[in-house]
Amino acid sequence: MGYFRRIFFLCVGVILVAIGLEQFLVPNNIIDGGIVGISIITSYVTKLPLGMFIILFNLPFLFFGYKHLGKTFLFSSLFSIGFLSIAVTFLHHFPKVTGDLLLSCIFGGIIIGIGLGIIFRNSGSLDGTEIVAMTISKKISFSVGEIIMFFNIFILGSAGVVFGWDRAMYSLIAFFIIFKTIDMVLEGLDESKSIIIVSDYYEEIASAIMTHLERGVTFIEGQGGYTKEPKKIIFCVITRLELAEMKHLVSEIDPKAFMAIENVHEVSGGRLHKTNQLLKFTQKKLFKAK
């Protein structure tokens, strides 16, 4: 069942990417980054189908990463790339949605970003440069993001030469929107926060968190760097909506308490997921009551 579920969501993601490309970006000479961007430029210059170049340019990168990356990731990527080449060829015959460049950047970027986010969540990829970046980053000091950014600077520069620098700047806007939308899909709207609290009133704070927020807490043994005194450090995970109440609870008990707050991309197990379900159920009941 998990296999068919992954295939289904990969298909949904690819269709959204194809719509964003063929109905918004490509007809207006706006490009995406990576191999898709190179394919768009090459297709424009040669007048040959975009789908052919998407799969042709990606195959060497997939072969390059075969021995370095997992089989699930490579299979999902190969399936997604092959399906995308078919989808963009089919949609190429439909008229574009709008000729407004800014609207094309915004809506095309959002649609592509949602599609790519769905593909990433299901262990797939549409860009061979990501595969190369993940492989190379293990051997050099540059991160995956830095390597991909280097590729995209070169690609956007090429778009400026071929389509004009105004189209290159619009492409940069679209790329930024895609990047932010992917983050939103991967992280979700119901963002979680991890909290680290250092205070001499750790028992009172922990009790308040468990009573008022109904969150579990964990005590971590620590030591003051200057005083060398043992410390109890509180760790817990809450939702974004509970952050203000958390700060209020802590400040009431100990205004001098040290708090470190970080975004959490994914949470599994524990009480957080169950409590979120209860919160949504309660909100639904209240809405119906009104």
Image (cartoon, helix red, strand yellow):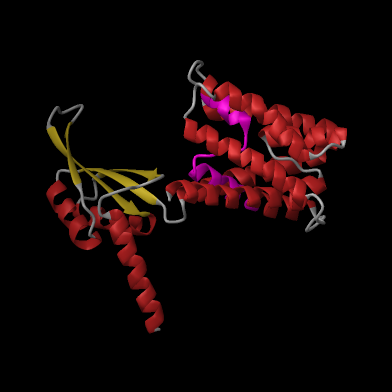
Count of marks placed on residues: 0
Asked if residue 31 can be seen in this view, the reply is yes
Q: Nearer the viewer, residue 130 or 259?
A: 130
On the image, the x and y values in percent for residue 239 come to: 35, 55
Question: At 57% across and 36% down in the image, what residue appears?
Answer: 77
- In the rendered image, the residue lying farthest to the bottom is 290
Lateral position of residue 207 relative to residue 29, left or right: left
Q: Position of residue 108 (x, y in %)?
A: 69, 51
How far across and how far down the image is residue 284, in percent?
A: 38, 74
> Residue sitting at 76 percent across and 36 percent down?
52
Q: Is residue 33 left or right of residue 11?
A: right
Residue 88 screen position, x and y as percent: 73, 46
Between residues 29 and 45, which one lies in front from this camera angle?
45
Question: Which residue range is magenta in the image?
Answer: 110-134
Examine the structure image and report whether residue 115 is included in the region drawn in magenta: yes
Q: Is residue 228 left or right of residue 263?
A: left
Residue at image location 79% in from the left, 51% down from the top: 101
Q: Quadrant of the C terminus?
A: bottom left
Q: Residue at x 49, y 49 (%)?
A: 4
Q: Which residue occupies the foreground of this view, 115 or 12? A: 12
Query: Looking at the magenta stretch, what is its main secondary structure?
Result: helix
Q: Is residue 164 in view?
A: no
